[in-house]
Amino acid sequence: MTHAAPLSEAKRAELSAHAMDQSLPIEERVATIKKLYPDMLNADGTTPTRTICVWDIVGKTGPIYNAAVDQQARMLGWGVDVKLEAYTSESVLAEDLKAGQCDAALFTGLRARLFNKFTGTIDSIGAVPSSAHMKLLMRVLTDPKNADRMVDGQYVVMGYAPLGAAYIFVNDRAINTLAKAAGKRVAVMDYDLVQAEMVQQIGANPVPTSMISAGGKFNNNNVDVLPAPLVAYNIMELYKGIGDTGGIVNYPFSQLTLQLVGRAERFPNELAQLVREDFLKRYEELEKIVEQLEIINSPEKDRNFNRWFYDWNKRVKNKKEVISTATVSIFWTTILFLCVALLFQKSLAGLLNIDKEYINYAIWILAFDALVIIPFSKLRAEQRPIRYSVLKISNVLIYLLLNVFLLAILPNLAQSNPQGFWSSFYVADYQIGYVFLSNLMASLFTFVLFMPHYFQPNWFFNNELWKKMLHYGWPILFAGLAFGINEHLDKILLSEWLDPATAKAAVGAYSACYKIGLFMVLFRTAYTLGIEPFFFSQAGNTNAPQTYATITKYFVILGSLILLVVVVFADVVKILLVRDQQYWEAMSIVPLIIIANFFLGIYTSLSVWYKLIDKTIIGAYISAIGAFITLSMNYILIVKFNLSYLGSAIATICAYGSMMVISYYLGKEKYPIPFEMKKILTYLFASITLACISFYVTELRETFVFGILAIIGFSYYIYKNEKEVILKLIKRK
C-alpha cells in the first residue's frame, strides 16, 4: 500500500466537493477520489479487488446477477476492480457483509433496512405509490446534497434499482378486507420485527419466513396471506397455493427495490456517489427488465388463473368476448323491442296522441340506431377517430341533405311539373313525415355500413359477463336519464311556469341563445368521445393517475381559452346562429350557459374515477343530485324570483358546477389523482373573470378592445406557464 502525507481538513473538503461535482468528467472525479484516499491504492497505484455479493433467488443465471455483471464492467472502466459472488440466501449474504466477507452486497430494500434506516423506508407499505414516484425519489436520493444520508455507521448505500410492485397473494378470496385477515396466518420476513407488529395490529398471526421458504409455506398452506412481487407467481410457483379459491389483490401496497450496500472503508462515499449516479442513468433500463420479468411471469399468462378485484373488463382475457357478448345482447334485445313495438304501435300512437305512421318511423329509427352502438363503441375502443368521425358526419350530412331536398327542393320540382317523375314522390303537408323519413334513411345508411359486423362467424354469449355488464351499465342508464333532465327540463319548466302570454317567446329566446354555447358543447363532446376509451386503456398503467391529471389540466386550459373567445365574440356569433333579432334579448344567459357546459366537460374528466373502479352507481347519485338542483332552482328562480330564462341559466350552471365539485371531492378519497388544482383554478378564475367583464360591462363589450386584449393576455399567460409543453408540440409537428 502507498503512504502519502495526510491531507488537511480543508484540502479533504475541497477534494471531496470536486469528486462529488456532477458537471465534471467521470475520469477527473475518479482521479480526485484516488488523491483523496491514497491508502486505498495498491503499491503499484492500482485499486485492490473488491468483492460484491449479489443476491439472486436463481443464482448466477438470474436477471439480478446478470445486471450486476454489467455494473462490474462499468466500474472496471473507472479503475475499480470488482469480483462478483452469487448468493441465493439473503440472510447468509447479510451475515457475510457484516463479517467482512463481502465488501458490498446487492439485496432487497427490505434487507437493506438493517444497514441504513433512511433508504430502508423506501420499501415500506404505502411509502412510494407508483413507479413514477419511485423514479422521482431515485433522482432526489442521488443528488449529492443527500450523500451524507447514504452513510449509516460503517455502511454506505451505493445504489438502488426498481424491483416492481408488491401485491397480496391469498389462498382464499374471502380475505378481501383487513377485517377478514384477522386470525389468518400472514408471512413476514423473519428479520423484520416491524412487519410482525403491523400484522398483529390487524389481528392476524405473523409467520416468520425467509425469501427462499416463503413460496413453499404459501403453497403448502402454512400461511394464508403472502406479500410478494408479481414475478413470484411463476418463479415461486405461487399458483399452487392460490389454487381454485385464491387470488391476488390488484392493488400494489408498496414499490420494492434492490439496494447495493457497501462497507464504507472499502467504498468511500465519493466513490459510492459515482455508483449511485450510474444506477440512476440505468433506471429505465432496469425498469424495463423488471417489466419484462413481470410479463413473462404474469398471472395473465395462466389461463386457469382465477382472480378477483380486477375490473370485470380486465378479467376478460379476450376483448372479442366482450364485443361478442355485447353484440348478441344488443341484437336480440333490439329484435325483441322491434317485434313488441310494431305489435303495439297502434296502442302507442293512441296513448301518445301521435300519428301511427310517425310511431312506425320512430320504432325503426330507434332499432337501427341501437344496432350501430356496438360497432361505434368498437371504433372508439380501437382508437380509430377518423373512421368514427367520417361515419358520424356522413349520418348528419345525409339527414341534412335529405331534409333540404324533401322540404325545400321536392315541393318546387313537383309544382313545376305536376305530371313529372318527382311529383309521384311528393306528398303535400307532409313536412313532419319528411323529417322522420330523412332521419330513418340516415340511420339505415349507417346500419348498412356496419352490417358486416353482424355477419361475423363464431359469435358467442358469456352469461356471467353479460350480468356484470348490466350491473356496470344500469347506473349509467339512470345517470343518462338524470342528464336528460338537466339538459332539457329547464325549457319545459319555462313553458309551464311562465305566463302563457310570454312563455313561448321566452322559451324561444332562451333556446336560440343557448345555441351559442354550441362551440363549448362540441369541444366537450369531442373530448368525451375520445378521452374515455383512452382513460380505460391507461387504467392498468401505474402512471395512470398522473396521466389523468395532466390531460384534465390541458382540457381546462384549452376550454378556458375557448370560453373566453366565444364570450368575447358572442355578439358576432349571434348574427350567424340567432337570426331572429327579437331573441337577442336573452343574450345575457350566454356566458352562463358556456360556463355551465364547460363545468360539465370538467365533470366528465373528473368522473372517470368511478367508472375505473366499477362504482358507476356513484355517477347515478351525482346526476340525480344535479337533476334535483335543476328542478328546485328553476322553481325558486322562475316562480319565486321571476327571473325567467335567466333563472334557468343560473340553475344550469349551479347543477353542473355542483356535480363537478362533488365528483372532485369524492374522487379524492376513492381514487386519488394528483390534479394541479392551483393552476387549474387559476386558469378557470382568470378566464371566467375576463369573459364576464368583457361581456357584462357594456362599454367594454361594444368596442371588443378589452376582449381582444384579454384573449391575447390570457394566451400569453398560458404560453408562459406551459411553454415547455407547447414548444415540444410545435417541434413534433
Image (tube, rainbow, N blue to C red):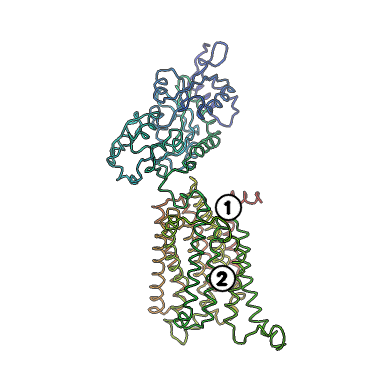
Q: Point out residue 192 in the picture as x, y percentages from the top left corner.
A: 34, 31
Q: On screen, 550 above or below 106?
A: below
Q: Point out residue 208 in the picture as x, y percentages from the top left corner.
A: 32, 31
**Residue tagged by mark 1?**
720
Q: Point out residue 452 in the picture as x, y percentages from the top left corner.
A: 60, 61
Name the mark on residue 157: none
Closer-to-camera residue (345/581): 345
Near mark 1 (Cα within 10 A), the count class, few <14, some 14-19 or many ≥20, is: few
Q: Point out residue 275 in the picture as x, y percentages from the top left corner.
A: 52, 27
Name the mark on residue 700: 2
CB of mark 1 within 8 Å of CB of mark 2? no
Q: Residue furthest front?
A: 458
The residue positioned 62% from the left and 60% from the top of the image is 387
**What's the CA distance linking mark 1 and mark 2?**
26 Å
As helix, strand or loop, the secondary structure at mark 2 comes to helix
Relative placement, left or right, of 568 versus 200 is: right
Q: On screen, 631 above or below 322?
A: below
The residue positioned 65% from the left and 49% from the top of the image is 732
